[in-house]
Image (cartoon, rainbow, N blue to C red):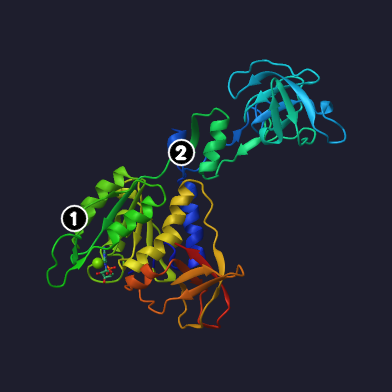
Amino acid sequence: MTEPTFPFRVPFDEACGIVDAVAAERRLQPQTVSLSRAHGHVLARDVVATLPQPPFDNSAMDGFALRHADLAADGAPTRLRLTGEQFAGPDAALTVESGTCVRITTGAPLPAGADTVVMKENTALEGDAVIVQIAPKPGQHVRRAGEDSRVGDLLLRAGDTVTPARIGLAASQGLAQLDVVRRPTVAVFATGDELVEPGMSLGPGQIYNSNRDQLMALLRAEGLEPVAFPTLPDDAAQVTSALRHAGEAFDLVLTCGGVSAGEKDLLPELLQRRGRVRVWKVMMKPGMPLLLAEGDTLGPSLFLCLPGNPVSVLATWLALGRRLVDGLQGRAPRALRRARLASDWTKMHERLELLRGRWWIDDDGISWVEPNPADGSHRMLAAADSDALIVLDAGPRAYATGTPVDVLPY
Ligand code: AMP
Ligand code: MG
């Protein structure tokens, strides 16, 4: 290969910077979605309150609305005349005069004149009289208009992820739709002459395609609706044709396998010739062969080519693929967590490592992570037994038990 004209064999942090830059250049457009479809999207615009919340003074309890000044100052029981009922629903426009009270339910508008609610449990009924046995404090059990938010308050920010609580908040403003960033469309390809789909029978030298369904699940976990294509053979003409078609139709074409240095690894050559490579080879373990390119003559898509080993797919997706998809939507990269290593670990090689391990928080609130010694990128059982990537910085190092490290739970 002639000297590459693109970032090649770059440190992991530099690859993150390139992914962020590419994502920022290709930030996806806003779209309006109904509230029922908004969960997990990234907000494209701030949401500002146009209603106070609560919109009117209302009761926080089932009980009786009263005037606090009517209650006996020494805390003795007070008898009030019951003059009406205000349930949650239409405002009956009642007034509480001195010495009277109105039956009220939770969420019902507070009648004029009332300033306090006594809960039902602290009263007794005698004919049309209510005996207040335990006096509420002034203003107790009244939810004041605007105490949660006022007109003009910033409720949600562009870039926030839409969570169920934020959907509830938007609904409370009467919003039936939200402006969110469009999610990227993603095509998924596995490559390799050795691959057979699960459910079929295996011939000699063949293995099952683990990556396609693993990747589909990883993508769906991000709320994406990826499209899986038939597995590509290691054949240049077929790979070119398939990627050219997908390159016209999707925001992101995700491949796995065929991106390394073997005779049948066709993707680097294809993407150097037909695309515009933004980065190839990241100094990470696993996942070094990763390649990110713009489609150029393959179409307007972005191409993210992950290595073939299933654990490399998992690690590169979580560390860089998801970061790309987040960035395309204007979402900040996921925060890493900290944990203490639960056993000694000797890191021998130069590259940053994303080791698999089990992560937990002990009874004292200290988080720990136990690295799995089966660290080969084909060790799927170890990855499946684990629930976090342990980030070990570049360079060899002996880690003692208890050393704090970054972890990325999965
Ligand atoms: P490659 O990068 O294509 O040379 O693949 C690296 C290793 O990953 C090889 O051992 C492949 O057989 C294996 N591999 C590639 N793709 C898949 C896949 N979809 N499922 C399981 N293993 C794969
Ligand atoms: Mg291959």
Q: What's the amino acid at mark 1?
A: Gln
Identify the secondary structure beneath mark 2: loop
> Residue drawn 69% across and 16% down?
94
> What is the quadrant of the C terminus in the image?
bottom left
Residues under labels 1 and 2: Cα distance?
38 Å
Identify the secondary structure beneath mark 1: helix
Label ID, residue 148? none
> Residue drawn 52% across and 45% down?
161
Residue located beneath label 2 in the image = 38
Q: Position of residue 321 (x, y in %)?
A: 41, 57
Asked whether the viewer can see residue 58, the reply is no
Disc 2 residue lies near ligand 1 with CB under 8 A: no
Q: Position of residue 79 (x, y in %)?
A: 78, 26
Task: Choose top left, top right, bottom left or bottom right for residue 58.
Answer: top right
The residue nearer to you, when weighing 290 against 197, is 197
Q: Position of residue 218 (x, y in %)?
A: 37, 56
Above or below: residue 129 compared with residue 230: above
> Residue drawn 62% across and 70% down?
364
Above or below: residue 342 compared with residue 22: below
Residue located beneath label 1 in the image = 238
Task: Choose top left, top right, bottom left or bottom right for residue 183.
Answer: top left
Q: Residue furthest front?
A: 126
Which class describes the residues within 10 Å of circle 1: few (<14), some (14-19), or many (20+)? Answer: few
Q: What's the amino acid at mark 2?
A: Ala
Which class describes the residues within 10 Å of circle 2: few (<14), some (14-19), or many (20+)? Answer: many
